[in-house]
Amino acid sequence: GDSVTQMEGPVTLSEEAFLTINCTYTATGYPSLFWYVQYPGEGLQLLLKATKADDKGSNKGFEATYRKETTSFHLEKGSVQVSDSAVYFCALGQSGGYQKVTFGTGTKLQVIP
Amino acid sequence: DVKVTQSSRYLVKRTGEKVFLECVQDMDHENMFWYRQDPGLGLRLIYFSYDVKMKEKGDIPEGYSVSREKKERFSLILESASTNQTSMYLCASSLTGGRLYEQYFGPGTRLTVT
């Protein structure tokens, strides 16, 4: 079945550091890929998405490129802020059917001033 | 904006009690989902529903049941709560259609079973 593997956390960075959170997936066909973010005390919200190979999703300074050849969707940000501290989930979904999404285990990011 | 609300943010129940978790969405979404979130395990799908009165088992349905009598409301029921059901429970909803739509999440219910 479909699966998502993302790097273990927590990740601790200083403000303005470069961020990479690795994500790889296993899936049949051509899934859509997502990054969701969960801020403390809140539910998940969609951060960015890509629906086909070589697409780049971007939002709030975060980017991720759908790499089919390496089955990866790594999240990057050039300069993190304290307000980016959250848990980040990589996820994949298959169109059609019942809209099920498979989530990774989450990576906690802590940004210190 | 889509809003997904859950009946409680925090809940404490005793072993053996019947527990109801309620979720309501206000955007006429067809699909609704219940997940549990545990450290190191991420989100695991318990049940989902793609229409009123319709339901499908997710990856970990044992010990749970669901009810969807109205389109906007999806309830998760723990028939006889056990300590291993202590967890964060997240509800989500999404549109249906030919392409994959994003899921909108509620704030979660942190359930403790003692």
Image (cartoon, coloured by chain):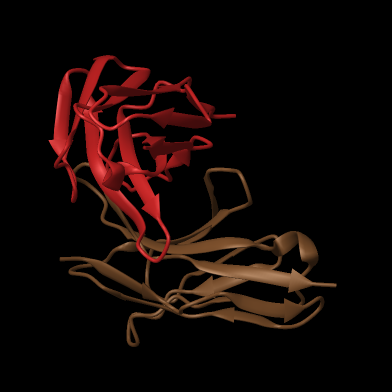
Q: Is residue A28 above or below residue B17?
A: below
Q: Would residue A14 appear left or right of B76 to someone viewing this image?
A: right
Q: Is residue B42 above or below residue B13?
A: below
Q: Residue at x 61, y 44 (%)?
A: A41
Q: Kindly indicate the quadrant of the structure image that contains residue A86.
A: bottom right
- Can residue A99 be seen in this snapshot? no
Q: Residue furthest bottom?
A: A70
Q: Residue at x 22, y 46 (%)?
A: A96
Q: Where, quadrant-wise, is the C terminus of chain B in this rendering?
A: top left
Q: Would residue B56 appear left or right of A108 to someone viewing this image?
A: left
Q: Residue furthest right?
A: A113
Q: Position of residue B93 (x, y in %)?
A: 39, 34
Q: Is residue A64 above or below residue B16?
A: below
Q: Residue at x 46, y 65 (%)?
A: A106
Q: Residue at x 47, y 62 (%)?
A: A89
Q: Position of residue B111 (x, y in %)?
A: 42, 36
- Can residue B17 be seen in this snapshot? yes
Q: Where, quadrant-wise, is the N terminus of chain B in this rendering?
A: top right
Q: Nearer the viewer, residue A98 or B107?
A: B107
Q: Kindly indicate the quadrant of the structure image that contains residue A69.
A: bottom left
Q: Position of residue A21 (x, y in %)?
A: 54, 78
Q: Nearer the viewer, residue B40 or B93?
A: B40
Q: Position of residue B32 (x, y in %)?
A: 32, 32
Counting the numbered discs, the total is 0
Q: Is residue A62 above or below residue A14?
A: above
The colour of chain B is red
The colour of chain A is brown
